[in-house]
Amino acid sequence: MRRASLPMDEDRFDLLPYISILMCLLGTLLLMTMSMAALYLKDPGAVWETGARTAEHAQLPVLVEWDGNTVVVHRRKSILRIALGRDLRQWWGRDGSFANPQMAAFVQAMASRRDSEYALFAVRPSGFDSFQTLAREFRSQKIAVGYEPIEQNKPVRLRGGTEGR
């Protein structure tokens, strides 16, 4: 007499549906985590790194934002806002220097420290037209000038221990 045996397929337990469910759950959790991280992370804006003087870079930058209307000077512990206006004819006094006393004092201070500092301009699109006029005054005082375009509404800040005095 022959014994009837059960087919092997009836004894197996298929895990594929459970693995599929587990993978969908993990994918959903990953999507939720990445979405929440994207919502809560903010763009820090443009950050300029400044460091110690080296043999290559003997001068430290003084960050100057220019939007075509206002000069914003970033120092280590202070921010100075100087409104010049959009009309270039209003910028100058009778002696050919800046009519705004704050701007004249800033340019003089930069000129007195020209060996240790230079003006690094962050130029916004609204300030492109008048930037060269502004930079020309710095250059006429033998102040080194660097510049970089920056988005109109992007915040700017300096990071580093020795941005200036």
Image: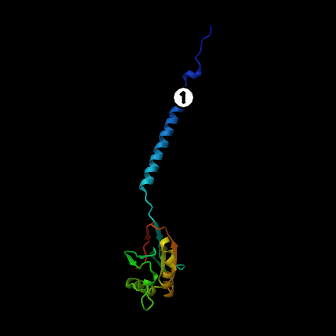
Q: Dot 1: few (<14), some (14–19), or many (≥20) neighbours within 10 Å?
A: few
- Above or below, 47 relative to 144: above
Q: How many marks?
A: 1
Name the residue nearer the viewer: 121 or 50. 121
Name the residue nearer the viewer: 126 or 39. 126
Instruction: For residue 27, say whether it is visible.
Output: yes
Q: How is the image coloured?
A: rainbow
Residue 60, position as x, y percentages in the image: 47, 78
Residue 57, position as x, y percentages in the image: 52, 79
Name the residue nearer the viewer: 42 or 93. 93
Q: For residue 72, which quarter of the picture?
A: bottom left
Residue 79, position as x, y percentages in the image: 38, 75
Q: Secondary structure at mark 1?
A: loop
Amino acid tagged 1: Asp
- Residue at 43% in and 59% down: 42
Q: For residue 9, which quarter of the picture?
A: top right
Name the residue nearer the viewer: 89 or 28. 89
Which residue is most to the right? Answer: 2
- Above or below, 102 relative to 35: below
- Above or below, 92 relative to 47: below
Residue 84, position as x, y percentages in the image: 41, 80
Which residue is most to the bottom? Answer: 95
- Which quadrant does the C terminus fall into? bottom left
- Which quadrant does the N terminus fall into? top right
The residue wearing badge 1 is 14
Instruction: For residue 58, say whether it is visible.
Output: no
- Residue at 47% in and 43% down: 28
